[in-house]
Image (cartoon, rainbow, N blue to C red):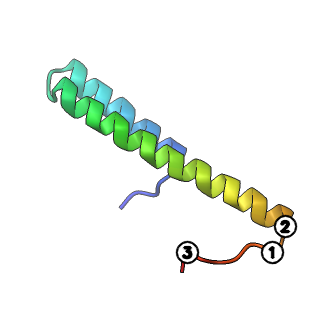
Amino acid sequence: MEKANSKSIFKHLFSEMKRLKNGEISVDEAKSQAHLARQANNVLKYELDRAKTVAEFPGTIREIED
């Protein structure tokens, strides 16, 4: 299992673009992959924003994810 980070998302997207160009996948499949990458990027942005907030206000952010 790969780590979810910007580098791995871009690596996957470029791989999918190459497969689309070579006719190995359909446009619809490429769109689905792009949508999933967008969702993963949103999660990464959320985690970054959360980390910034926790750093700015230590001890005041409730842990509700567990």
**37 relative position to 7: left or right:** left
Relative to 31, say whether 39 is above or below: below
Q: Quadrant of residue 22?
A: top left
Which kind of residue does numbered mark 2 sit on?
Phe
Total labels: the figure holds 3
Marks 2 and 1, how far apart in space? 6 Å
- Residue drawn at (36%, 43%) of the image: 36
Q: Are marks 2 and 1 in contact (CB under 8 Å)?
A: yes
Figure check: 62 above or below 15? below
- How packed mark 2 is, by other alpha carbons closer than 10 Å (few <14, some 14-19, many 20 or more), is few
At mark 1, the secondary structure is loop
**As rendered, which of 28 and 6 lies closer to the eye?**
28
Q: Which residue is mark 1?
A: 60
| Outermost residue to the top | 21
Write the residue at 21% across / 24% down.
27
Q: Secondary structure at mark 2?
A: loop
- Check the picture and name the quadrant holding the C terminus: bottom right
Image quarter where the N terminus lies is bottom left
Q: Which residue is mark 3?
A: 65
Q: Secondary structure at mark 3?
A: loop
Q: Residue at x 81, y 77 (%)?
A: 59
Residue at mark 3 to residue at mark 1: CA–CA distance: 15 Å
Q: Which residue is mark 2?
A: 57
Tell me the kind of residue under disc 3. Answer: Glu
Indicate the amino acid at tag 1.
Thr
What distance separates the C-alpha of mark 2 from that of mark 3?
A: 18 Å
Above or below: residue 21 compared with residue 13 = above
- Viewer-nearest residue: 58 or 16: 58
